[in-house]
Amino acid sequence: MPRPPLRALLLPLLLGVSAPAAAQSVAPAPAAPAPAPSEAPQSSAAQSSLVQPGSALRGLWIDAFGPGLKTPAQVKQTVQDAARLGVNTLFVQAIRRADCLCRRASVPPISDADLTPGFDPLDAITAQAHARGMRVIAWLSVTGVANTTVPNTSPDHLMRAHGPDAGRASWLARRPDGSWLEGKDAWLDAAIPDAAEYMTQAAVSLVRHYPVDGIQLDRIRYPDGGAWGYDPKVLARYRAETGRPGTPAPTDPTWQAWKREQITNLVRRIALEVKAVRPDAWISAATITYNDAPTDLSGFRRTRTYTDVMQDWPTWMQTGLLDLNVLMNYKRDAAPPQGAWFDRWNAFAQQVQTRPDGQRVALASGTAMYLNAPKVTAAQAARSVQAGLGWVGYSYRTPTADVYGQRQDTPAGLGAVQAALTAPGGVLNTPRPWTESPVTTRGLLGRITGAGTPGGQTVQVLRDGKPIAQAQTDALGYYGFATLTPGAVEVRVSGQRWLDRVPERGVVRLPDLLVRAVQIIPSLPPAKP
């Protein structure tokens, strides 16, 4: 695709640098579904919950590991079943294992004998769901890219050129002994710059080519177990950027923090690239809630979510990288104390819901229908909604524990869970739309090139000569900000300056900035409490 002309508003103040390349254009967002007729008057408690961002969301995950998306008849049935259930949003698995249930993404289509030749499931389900007033969020597995039992057979799949036997070209996450399988699954390592670029472009291709209402990042983390990230290229980067010699232990706090930053850098890059293309697209993540919930941020930093799989989703929320956080709050009320854990994770998420600029990120509790009886699913959904969160059920294909255990077929399970969720007092008793817009993103995204080490360089944003934000570049030299206030700003990196304007909504993609010699920029002083 040809690049557009340089934005007229960009005023480079050259300090011995050459002119950069042009920025990308911004496409309009699709229209939201029309609101439904107003419901009966609500109690004051219910009215209070309705103003919580995401509280009107009633969703269903549609996975791609079985029937539901692979033929025109399956897609038609899926949409009909979802409409009958009364949900207002479908989280549709688009990118499954570095392949897509679609035909216009940057990754190849799935190679599945059950997929109708030439059929585009994402295109079909988006059109049919929109026609019924439902939103569609394209769900993608970011780092989970292969399964050795059912490999993708396309010659274009990344495992051909970047798999376990590709040497320095391999993109896979590895243990200290070089092994790369977690069970039968292979994972990309977000700390490998080319792999991060690949993941980013896959996500952006969905919003470029399909009228989806947003994306959801899944498997945006390292595999379970903590002992991952030991590809030689990753270790070399770590040593160069931190100055620490040797091979770190999995529990080394500096090593953990560095890997966690690689995941956050990837979330930032995807979020800002998507917002630069479509400002009103929802950026969502399906986030980890292992075991019991913390009571505060200090406690969160001792959880497995933070120290094992390196997922720092409170930071993603508070720095404006997520519009919607859907907790994978997969607990079984019949196995005490998991019911209490469920409620405490919902409560903790609300503690970190508000960004420093006062805007609140939308929240929903994702529940494991496949682990529970329908009455438990209904109870967990009700507790989530009563707490002011939305609700999303996993999944359409396995809606009850009996279906998951092969004691019941899917149609029977859907009927049972529908009866529970639509009963008097149930969260789907009265169908309702979800029409709110994402929390406002006002940001900048840019890249430095030419530096010997593009990662870890300090970038500052100033207004009226005073620093208002600061960030570090990632391994490819990218930097970005999502929660700036609109208006004129100056961007500084390595003694070089650029003027631009933060938009009222969306992300400005700045041109690449050539850095010939890296200069140290002092860090901002810590903010006053």
Image (cartoon, helix red, strand yellow):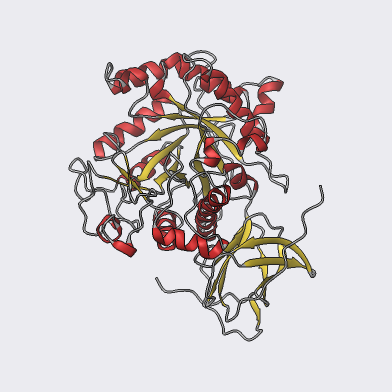
Q: Nearer the viewer, residue 465 or 265?
A: 265
The residue at 30%/23% (across/down) is 410
> Which x, y percent locates residue 517?
60, 80
Side of 104 relative to 54 (left or right):
left
Q: Note whether residue 495 is visible.
A: yes
> Which x, y percent locates residue 70?
25, 40
Outermost residue on the front side: it is 246
Quadrant where the N terminus sits is bottom left
> Which x, y percent locates residue 400?
37, 20
Q: Quadrant of residue 232?
A: bottom left
Give the total of numbered labels.
0
Residue 281 drawn above or below residue 135: below
Side of 326 relative to 179 (left or right):
right
Q: Nearer the viewer, residue 262 or 212?
A: 262
Side of 128 relative to 326 (left or right):
left
> Which x, y percent locates residue 4?
49, 74
Outermost residue on the right side: it is 528
Side of 353 relative to 212 (left or right):
right
Residue 109 drawn above or below residue 409: below
Q: Note whether residue 33 is visible.
A: no
